[in-house]
Image: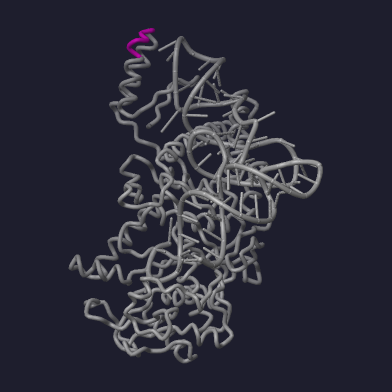
Amino acid sequence: MALKLFNTLTRSVQEFAPLDPAGKKVGMYCCGPTVYDFAHIGNWRTFVFADFVRRTLEFSGYDVQHVMNITDVEDKIIKRVRENKTTLRDFTGKYETAFLDDLKALGCREPHQKPCATDHIPEIIALIEKLVTRGVAYQASDGSVYFSIEKYRGCGCHYGQLLKLNLDELRTGERVAADEYEKESVADFALWKARVPDDGDVFWPSPFGEGRPGWHIECSAMSIKALGETFDLHLGGEDLKFPHHEDEIAQSEGATGKPFVKFWLHGAHLLVEGKKMSKSLGNFFTLRDLLAKGFTGREVRYLLLTAHYRETFNFTIDGLHGAKSALARIDECVGKLRELAESPKSKIQNPKPEAALIDRFTAALADDLNISAAWAAVFEWVREINKRLADSSLSAGDAGAALAAWEKVESVLGIGVKADAEIPAEITALAEERTAAKKAKDFKRSDVIRDELKAKGWVIEDTPKGIKLKKI
RNA sequence: GGCGGAGUAGCCAAGUGGUAAGGCAGGGCUCUGCAAAAGCCUCAUCCGUCGGUUCGAUUCCGACCUCCGCCUCCA
């Protein structure tokens, strides 16, 4: 089934087809983090979304090359390096490591390439030189090099591909007025920023003098290096459409004369507890904050993946509790299925995945990544499986096929399996004591122990095959 | 002010010109000595408000109300 995606370039849902003539390879670039602090839950929505797109493409049979940049030189970073009296490397290294740890905790597949801006200064300089040579960039009296939107448009290029812009009436707000740079036009943006005293030792030599790259140029330089002058997919948060992505297009197409990206995908932002995230409202969370509250990465991932990517999503702590329950339901069902399918005496080798679940799931994803419909397919499947498990109408072969289907679906969802918690000896001892009390029909005693276990974070369930301990 | 997105049950959230998926919470039931983050069932005469088009509108059109995003370095 053909995958259809909403392309910001055309503002419409289009059938996705890669540039690769063989229809196999897909180049995908996602704007990554600026490593000046821990990423917050809003950032994570975008990165989990990117991972979901990648997994969907891989599920669809494509060979994806996933590139995510790490922005490790930028105004805020330099400011904090100065404040903390540290070095650029030490400072950004700390947050980069934290970012990659969090990415893993959220079940994201690691991007194939994670280029850093500071490792690509020569490529960035080369790209700027190309733009200067082609006459769409100029060096101003302050020493910085700017991209000229007027010259670019003068070559017949289109500035404003991702959104409607009225360049003549660009609002000259406070931020523009406060701009101290010497640009020819307010819409122009910096490619190379001349060194200033506040930069400390964060600067590189270049044909334009000492300085550092502008914000947008690194993405053009690194994506072109990693994926070629024209590639398939570029994604990021919706706020990046303008100016960041628009400027990336301008720089790239201005330098190569070729179309930059075929499909642009933008993820919507989220609200937290119905409000815009802010530190003063107390609804500003990093992943670490949520883990400290006792939630797990897979619960956060599940919640972030319950809504369509183009809709603003309301992230709540209540929703996180719901995520816990919903995942427990899936875990329970898949666990039982696995037990039945993998019992040694009836195990079937390489069962054919049951088509019903996969078909519905695939159709949902193909429809511009309708994840809600995909989850509906999953939960209706869970209910059906539970019924069949309850009335014993599921053979080991059926279970194997169902499990095989689940594993395919799971490869996209990426929620993994609940980590098998080590059962402490103390808990095992209590459970055994309870079983003994039960056997002796001392139910009062067994209930007391059950409460005690619960207080210690363990739920005990009686099943036909004996007791089952679960970590809360 | 310009451009764009959204208002669906207690909460989260899909969807359609023909009468509302799914999850959580709630309620009922089953299993159980009793239970259970165990299982099943149930849970919107109705989709922001008011008009219009239509045999029929939550869906299309118009107005209004409310919320949100971008408009030069923010996911």
Vertical relation: A145 (above or below) A358: below
| Residue depicted at 40% across the width and 70% down the height | A115
Residue A124 position by quadrant: bottom left
| Residue A143 appears in view | yes
Horizontal side, residue A361 vs residue A183: left or right: right
Horizontal side, residue A389 vs residue A37: left or right: right
Counting from the top left corner in percent of width and height, residue B16 is at 70, 47
Horizontal side, residue B1 vs residue A472: left or right: right
| Quarter placement of the C terminus of chain A | top left
| Residue depicted at 27% across the width and 71% down the height | A78
Report the front residue among A275 and A130. A275
Q: Is residue A442 magenta?
A: yes
Residue A139 position by quadrant: bottom left
Chain part drawn in magenta: A441-446
Outermost top residue: A441
| Residue depicted at 35% across the width and 75% down the height | A177
| Residue A335 appears in view | no
| Quarter placement of the N terminus of chain A | bottom right
The way the protein has been coloured in the rendering is: one colour
Image label count = 0
Horizontal side, residue A334 vs residue B45: left or right: left
Q: Is residue A385 magenta?
A: no
| Residue depicted at 32% across the width and 18% down the height | A449
Counting from the top left corner in percent of width and height, residue A324 is at 44, 37
Magenta stretch: helix, strand or loop mostly: helix
Outermost left residue: A85
Counting from the top left corner in percent of width and height, residue A75 is at 31, 71
Counting from the top left corner in percent of width and height, residue B37 is at 45, 27
Residue B40 position by quadrant: top right
